[in-house]
Amino acid sequence: MKETFSRRGLFQRTLGAAGLAIGNAPAPEKRNVLFIVVDDLRPELGCYGNRIVKTPNIDRLARRGVVFTRAYCQQSVCTPSRTSFLTGLRPDTTKVFDNRGGEFRKLLPDVTTLPQFFLQQGYETRGLGKIFGEGLNDPKAWSIPLWPESIAGMQYVDVEKWAQVPSAEKSRTPVPTLTWEKRETCQAPEVPDGALQDGQVAERAVQALREMRDHPFFLAVGFLKPHLPFVAPKKYFDLYSLREIPDPPCPSPPKGAPAVALHPSVELRGYTDIPKKGPLPPGKARELILGYYAAISYMDAQVGRLVDELERLKLASRTVVVLVGDNGYHLGEHGLWGKTTNYELDTRVPLIFSGAGVKARGAKSPGLVECVDIYPTLVELCGFAPPPALEGVSMAPLLGEPSRPWKKAAFSQFPRPFTPKRAGDGMGYSVRTERYRYTEWRIPGQPQNAIELYDHQTDPCESVNIADLPANRSLVAQLHKTLQDGWRAAL
């Protein structure tokens, strides 16, 4: 802890000295922020080592910045995770444990969200797409209202109606869509990118960049894909072949895992081509993975439009670009589909910082970082002092020295049961260290906590729970203390 406090103190003294030195000099040009949030994106990208998925535009961002290879969300589902990194507070503080959202304003009416902070510094702040969560908004955050007012969840193309439109009229006819009803898991319609909401969000974002180019801005852009259903224009499905898609590794639940740690993949089971229970039909897992990859490539193309426009407008050199997934995702591993666990696949997310203020280029940082750290990092990169109540720390030093020593642990949590009325009654708390993942399930009415321990040095798939081995008693006690001591002690 002494090293951490001295590092903070050094930074504060440096800022103070810089303020004295510049005296009456002109204020430096403010940096812009392009904040890209992607729904259900796990680190399944070219820049993270996946040789099948095609993500040339995100990989381009990575070549110009730092890829964090061990970044963790604080709760592996959309709204609690987003609420956490947009307030800089952890779920036990926001009390947002499920996707109802909006609750943080009831408990913390005066909290300053990340875009709201920049609004208070004189920035123009705009939000496009899914930012705080489905159907959720925080009007205090934006200079102009969030667009769209409602998210096109479970969006499909109405192919029957679209087929009735004459070819000569298709270019000037809006593509009919269907929303908010689960149908098939994958759809590959022959439509332009702008037929679906992510393409429309990208178009709006390009226009916003043009409109805000002459003054400081914070632009948050939220893409829906690769969230289920895996719907993308056919050309993105055509990038892949089932022959190249492997079956999910580690397809069975971890040996010795408590039942409370798992779930029945409810999110997937609601789709019409998926059985309500039991194994998936033969080959279905690979079809789903292909659909997930196609949706990623569609989203990647929209990211490319934003990056291209930054360059065209000559804004790239003074704009901090952040891309983050709100949570990880299971694609059949452990027999699970979706998120909502404390396992590595659900808590580990892609996180890339690129552009202005990022000194290391094309680098990877192995340090343990958390999504709650994004807020103070962006604030520091743009030359401001962060609000004192934040529960993360700036990662800015890692943007210059990606391999420097960093946190001892990262923390996540997930409620059981995960239902709107009871989320938070019981909680699984998980800590990820350099080598281990340790989780305690604290459920009311149970005589003792269910615990999990996985050794990532010998078992990166988290396939065997070794918490009950007598040889690991002292290790379990040590990790229990790490969990109890909390995030501040891990700095």
Image (tube, rainbow, N blue to C red):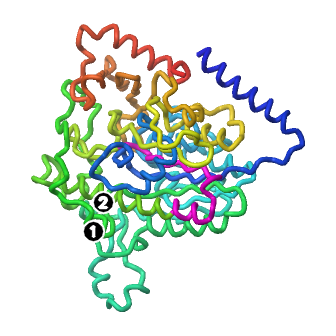
For the point 35% across and 41% down, the residue is 340
The front one of 75 and 325 is 325
Quadrant, the N terminus? top right
For the point 73% across and 28% down, the residue is 12
Residue 260: percent from the left, percent from the top? 28, 31
For the point 63% across and 59% down, the residue is 315
Q: In the rendered image of this protein, does residue 24 appear above or below residue 459?
A: below
Graded by Cα atoms within 10 Å as few (under 14), some (14 to 19) or many (20 or more), the crowding at tag 1 reads some
State if disc 1 and disc 2 touch (CB < 8 Å): yes
Residue holding disc 2: 294
On residue 188, the disc is 1
Quadrant, the C terminus? top right
Residue 449: percent from the left, percent from the top? 33, 20
Residue 286 is one of the magenta-drawn residues: no
- Report the magenta residues as a range: 306-328
Q: In the rendered image of this protein, does residue 26 appear above or below residue 304?
A: above
Q: Secondary structure at mark 1?
A: loop
In the picture, residue 158 is in which quadrant? bottom left
Q: Secondary structure at mark 2?
A: helix
Residue 105: percent from the left, percent from the top? 60, 45
Please identify the residue farthest to the left as the structure is shown: 282
Is 327 placed left or right of 213 in the picture?
left
In the picture, residue 396 is in which quadrant? top right
Q: Amino acid at mark 1?
A: Ala
Q: Amino acid at mark 2?
A: Ala
Graded by Cα atoms within 10 Å as few (under 14), some (14 to 19) or many (20 or more), the crowding at tag 2 reads many
The front one of 383 and 411 is 383
